[in-house]
Image (cartoon, rainbow, N blue to C red):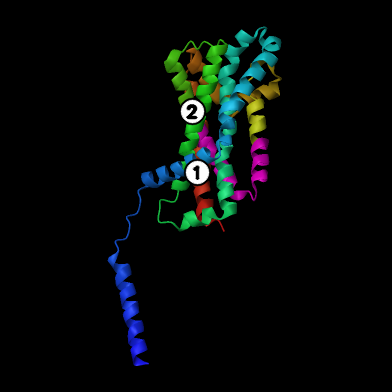
Amino acid sequence: MTNQTDQTAMNEERLRDAIASRTRPKRPSPLSSSLTFSSRALLRIKHVPEQLFDVTVFPVIFLLMFTYLFGGAIAGSTAEYLQFLLPGILVMTVAQITMYTGIDLNNDIRKGIFDRFRTLPIWLPSALVGALLVDMVRYSGASAIMITLGLILGFRPDGGVVGVLGAVGMILIFCFCLSWVWTTLGIIMRSEKSLMMMSFMVLFPLTFVSNVFVDPQTLPGWLESFVDVNPISLLVNAVRGFMHGNVTGEAIMWVFVASGIFLVIFAPLTMYLYRNKK
């Protein structure tokens, strides 16, 4: 009996020595953990390349369909309408794919991966920031495809390369801030279908009841008032200004104001829900 007790004590002492002898890994920095989660998001795209349909096929379909379907009726020619339409439909297309971060987060919650992330000794927002960084790549890809196709069809930006880059920069800033809305809803909603339904209910009126397709001055007064304060319209104004070389400081300011409102409200709300999700 005594020998068995001594053997148990020796085993426990060896176990403690084995654990204590190993150096505890350093806590990763916020940048390191964010880049790790970015790599995870890129791997998901690698294994499910169909996810890129929204940034490759859909922009091409939207641009061709709206240009040749409405160009002759609204502007008299598709070439003239393309100069007006492309900046707007570029904003509409990129804004509509901002919801995918929320959908991925919602899937992680339902599969239990979300709970594992919260137990790791990492900077807590890194899981969200990493996914949002990859989304910036998706937004840039969709913008490059649409602008390239537009140039092939006859779009000629008077603002030149600098104007186009400025326009894409405004879109990236705005869509990064808008993405926090969907991360908030991704935590709250109980299913992917509910989240998609909610996102369409929000994005559909914002993108279609805007100045993307027509000049707001042709609309009824009450509808024009809504279009003028619509955040999508504010972004379209700035993007059109950059691409056509006549952007104003006021147009840029309103985009920053709208982006700041989204970020200030929904980023802290997302992190609060992220920490306290049951």
Q: Viewer-proximal residue, 112 or 233?
A: 112
Give how far apart the Cα atoms at labels 2 and 1 are: 22 Å
Q: Answer few, some or many: residues within 10 Å of disc 2's Cα (few below 14, many 20 plus, some between 14 and 19).
A: some
Identify residue for label 2: 140
Q: Position of residue 122 (x, y in %)?
A: 40, 53
Magenta residues?
Answer: 172-201
Assign the magenta stretch its main secondary structure.
Answer: helix
Residue depicted at 53% across the width and 22% down the height: 145
Q: Position of residue 137 (x, y in %)?
A: 47, 32
Q: What kind of residue is marked 1?
A: Ala
Q: State whether residue 106 is above or below residue 20.
A: above
Instruction: Tell me: 60 left or right of 4.
Output: right
Q: Position of residue 270 (x, y in %)?
A: 52, 47
Q: State whether residue 218 is above or below residue 174.
A: above
**Residue 149 image-quadrant placement:** top right
Name the secondary structure under disc 1.
helix
Mark 2 or 1, nearer chain start: 2
Identify residue for label 1: 267
